[in-house]
Image: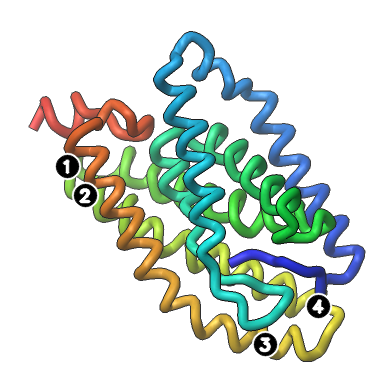
Amino acid sequence: MSFAQSVLAPWMLLLTSLLSLGVVAWVISRRPWQALRGDVALQHRWLGATLAVVLMWQLRAQAVDWLTLHLVFTVLLTLVFKAPLALISNVLINIAMVLIGRNEWMLLGANILVTGIVPAAIIGTVWRLVDRRLPDNLMVFLFVCGFFGSALATLGGGLAAVLLIVVAGTDPDAVYLAQEYARFLPLLMPSEALLTGMLLSILLVYHPDWVATFNDHRYIDLQ
C-alpha cells in the first residue's frame, strides 16, 4: 500500500519527509555500499532485485486516485540484503515511481516510511527474535521470517498508511475510505507472505549464501 496523490496535511508531509530523511541518513552513515564493493555478483543481484521490484510495483489495484494496493517486497529485500541495502533499494524504487509519474514527489517521504522503514523495522525485529531466541532450525527461519514476518510487516505498513490519513487527512472522504481500506489488509497479508515465503524457500534451497540474514553453517551444517 502506498500513496499516489496527496491527501495529507502539509505538516504531516514535512514530518514524514524529515523522519524518512533521518533514517536514510543513518543508513548512509553505515556505508552499506561497502558490501557491494569488490563483489560484482552481489552488485548484479542487488540491482536486479531493485529493478524487479520496480516492475512488480506496476501491478497495482487503485480504486481511488490517492491510494494504491500492491505487493511491497521490502521483507524479501531485507532478508536477502539486510536492512541498509534494502532501504536504499526502497528509496530508489520510490524515486522511480515519482519519475515515471505514478506518485507525487511530495509523498516521497511518506511512501518511504510506509513501504520501506516500517516493514524493514518489523522484519528486522522478527529476524533478531529468530536469531537470538528461537531454535536453530531451517523451517523456523523460513516460516517465522519468510511467512509470518512478511504478513506482520505488510499489516504494519498498511496500518501506518491508514494512521497517517486518519491523523492528518485533509479530505473527510479520504479518511473514511482509508478506514474501509484497512479491511483489505488481511487480503494483502497472505499474498505478500506466500510470495515472499516461496521466493525465500527457493533461495534457501539453491543459493543459501545469497540470503545475508541466513547462516547456512548454523542452520544446516550443524543440524
Quadrant of residue 12 in the image? bottom right
Residue 197: % across, % down: 29, 54
On screen, residue 47 above or below 195? above
* Residue to which mark 1 is pinned: 137
Q: Which of the two marks, 1 or 4, is nearer to us in this view? A: 4
Q: CA distance from mark 3 to mark 4?
A: 11 Å
Q: CA distance from mark 4 to mark 2?
A: 40 Å
* Residue to which mark 2 is pinned: 140
* Residue to which mark 4 is pinned: 169
Contact between marks 4 and 2 (CB within 8 A): the answer is no
User: Which secondary structure lies at badge 1?
Assistant: loop
Q: CA distance from mark 3 to mark 2?
A: 37 Å
Q: Nearer the viewer, residue 222 or 196?
A: 196
Residue 75: % across, % down: 45, 50
Q: Residue 177 shows which numbered tag? A: 3
What's the amino acid at mark 4?
Gly
Q: Residue furthest right?
A: 10
Quadrant of residue 84 in the image? top right
Q: CA distance from mark 1 to mark 4?
A: 45 Å
Looking at the figure, which quarter contains the C terminus? top left
Quadrant of residue 3 in the image? bottom right
Q: Nearer the viewer, residue 74 or 120?
A: 74
Q: Identify the residue shown where x is 43% and y is 23%.
A: 42
Within 10 Å of the Cα at label 2, are there few (<14), some (14-19), or many (20+) other Cα atoms?
Answer: some
Contact between marks 1 and 3 (CB within 8 A): the answer is no
Contact between marks 3 and 2 (CB within 8 A): the answer is no
Looking at the figure, which quarter contains the N terminus? bottom right
Left or right: where 221 falls relative to 107:
left
Q: Residue 208 shows which numbered tag? A: none
